[in-house]
Image (cartoon, rainbow, N blue to C red):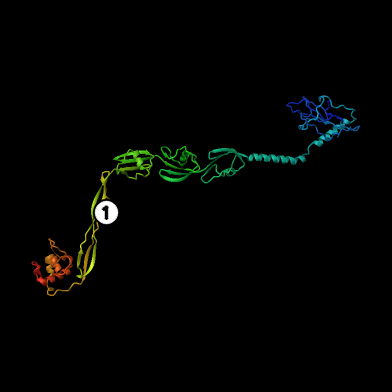
């Protein structure tokens, strides 16, 4: 083997080789080509791989076929360099002898000047194999563009932790903001749902998105009913969200209970301070009672019989409220009451005008009334009417009213002093009645005499003119005898 960097090769030397022993990791990297030489760099490299495929590589300058080279043809120099691409074609036949044996046995000495010519040919070959930068520039631009696009693709990919109603999951997305991410993942949110951060927030890798669905709660808080929404998952979380003071409070559902998407009804009564006044003593309690009656019981006060409180016992006790217990004793009393009668008046043409005669006397009715009498804390209260019933109805009084015109005079009696007689008998009063009730009117008629003269009813009920008219008629009949003490005044 020559020690020169370049060697000359004849045309009819073997073109296939085998790698008798693998190198390093068993890959059997080979150096050189089919020209059958051996090259060492401190360690031994063999040709080809341990694959079962023949070496089909042929350089452009290699003489084709197995024809002998023409006499005097110059041989081309080759530089032994390591292979840069693994041989994929296996060797068809193994070599029968090691590659350390020289494969080149020249049949004739090289022609004069052949070595210099070979060097020039090698330089031309290397120039021809040097890549053209102008041809490689578009390819380099394409590679740079693809590399930049890949970098941008990787940069747009974001790792996001999305928690929907307490269930977390990690995902990769190219969404720009929270709204786009939720739309891509099919997560629909409504007006009562919570998204943190907000729907329009720009996304960055490592972001944590929390979605909580709203749940309706029919809340009764200290007697006040309302319909509210919460994103809490448990009753205890909802109470904190509503700002309800849970210490000492009554809650209708367990605080650890999960709140479903359908919501729930929740009754909460916070602890309040109530003062109960009873039997001259004040008692203050802390209670979450639903009614005043329950708060009074918790204060150690018992209601008996008709006892009650200053506010309705079934009302809701407010914080700071003072409730007074009223001790009540009572009884029922039945009373009979008169029902007044009505008066009916009818015209009578037979009676002189101004004369009224009672045709039928009225009779009052009778009513039986039941009253409730009670004392509150020892003080008598106004009787309260409970019921009433009519024992018998009243009877109306009927009165006749005269419409007949009065006569102007009575012959033989008009010239007498009737005013003086009336002044002496009754003091000039038409309705006067003597102490015995027998005589009445201006001239003190008894009822029998009055009616014999055509009068109706009693004389004191008639007008002064009618009484004077009847007195004149009596004078014509009997003179002054009906008035033994005052009759002399007629002529005086």
| Crowd band around label 1 with a 10 angstrom C-alpha radius: few (<14), some (14–19), many (20+) | few
| Front residue of this view, candidates 467 and 417 | 467
- Going 23% across and 65% down the picture, which residue do you hit? 345
Q: Identify whether 295 is placed above or below 354.
A: above
Quarter occupied by residue 253: top left
Give the residue number, with chain letter if any, for mark 1. 389
Question: Where is the N terminus found, in terms of image quarters?
Answer: top right
Question: Where is the C terminus found, in terms of image quarters?
Answer: bottom left
- Going 64% across and 39% down the picture, which residue do you hit? 155
Residue 389 shows in the view: yes
> Where in the figure is residue 263, as x and y percent of width and height?
48, 43
The outermost residue toward the front is 392
> Where in the figure is residue 53, as x and y percent of width and height?
78, 31
- Going 44% across and 46% down the picture, which residue do you hit? 226
Q: Give the number of marks.
A: 1
Q: Identify whether 401 is placed above or below 68.
A: below
> Where in the figure is residue 129, as x and y percent of width and height?
80, 36
- Going 81% across and 36% down the picture, which residue do you hit? 127
Label 1 secondary element: strand
| Front residue of this view, candidates 218 and 73 | 218
Quarter occupied by residue 400: bottom left
Q: In the image, 480: left or right of 392?
A: left
Residue 446 shows in the view: no
Q: Identify whether 72 is placed above or below 460.
A: above
């Amino acid at each position: 083997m020559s020690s020169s960097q370049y060697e000359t090769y004849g045309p009819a030397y073997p073109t296939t080789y085998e790698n008798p022993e693998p190198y390093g990791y068993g890959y059997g990297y080979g150096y050189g080509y089919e020209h059958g030489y051996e090259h060492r760099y401190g360690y031994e490299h063999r040709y080809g791989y341990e694959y079962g495929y023949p070496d089909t590589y042929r350089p452009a300058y290699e003489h084709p076929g197995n024809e002998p080279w023409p006499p005097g043809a110059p041989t081309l120099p080759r530089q032994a360099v390591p292979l840069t691409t693994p041989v994929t074609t296996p060797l068809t036949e193994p070599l029968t002898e090691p590659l350390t044996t020289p494969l080149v046995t020249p049949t004739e000495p090289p022609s004069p000047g052949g070595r210099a010519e070979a060097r020039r040919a090698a330089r031309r070959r290397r120039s021809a194999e040097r890549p053209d930068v102008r041809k490689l520039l578009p390819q380099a631009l394409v590679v740079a563009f693809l590399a930049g696009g890949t970098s941008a693709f990787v940069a747009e990919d974001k790792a996001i932790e999305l928690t929907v109603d307490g269930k977390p999951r990690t995902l990769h997305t190219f969404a720009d903001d929270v709204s786009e991410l939720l739309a891509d993942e099919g997560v629909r949110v409504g007006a009562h749902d919570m998204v943190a951060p907000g729907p329009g927030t720009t996304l960055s890798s490592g972001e944590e998105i929390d979605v909580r669905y709203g749940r309706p709660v029919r809340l009764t808080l200290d007697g006040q009913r309302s319909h509210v929404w919460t994103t809490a998952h448990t009753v205890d979380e909802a109470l904190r969200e509503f700002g309800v003071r849970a210490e000492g409070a009554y809650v209708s559902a367990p605080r650890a209970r999960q709140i479903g998407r359908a919501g729930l009804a929740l009754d909460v009564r916070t602890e309040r301070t109530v003062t109960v006044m009873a039997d001259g003593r004040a008692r203050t309690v802390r209670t979450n009672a639903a009614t005043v009656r329950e708060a009074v019981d918790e204060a150690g006060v018992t209601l008996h019989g008709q006892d009650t409180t200053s506010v309705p016992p079934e009302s809701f006790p407010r914080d700071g409220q003072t409730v007074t217990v009223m001790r009540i004793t009572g009884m029922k009393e039945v009373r009979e009451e008169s029902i007044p009668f009505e008066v009916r008046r009818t015209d009578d043409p037979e009676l002189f005008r101004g004369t009224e005669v009672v045709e039928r006397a009225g009779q009052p009715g009778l009513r039986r009334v039941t009253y409730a009498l009670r004392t509150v804390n020892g003080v008598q209260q106004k009787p309260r009417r409970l019921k009433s019933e009519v024992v018998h109805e009243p009877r109306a009084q009927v009165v006749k009213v005269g419409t007949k015109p009065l006569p102007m005079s009575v012959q033989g009696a008009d010239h007498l002093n009737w005013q003086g007689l009336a002044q002496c008998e009754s003091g000039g009063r038409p309705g006067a009645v003597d102490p015995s009730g027998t005589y009445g009117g201006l001239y003190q008629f008894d009822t029998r005499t009055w009616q014999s003269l055509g009068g109706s009813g009693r004389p004191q009920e008639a007008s002064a003119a009618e009484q004077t008219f009847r007195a004149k008629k009596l004078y014509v009949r009997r003179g002054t005898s009906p008035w033994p003490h005052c009759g002399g005044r007629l002529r005086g």
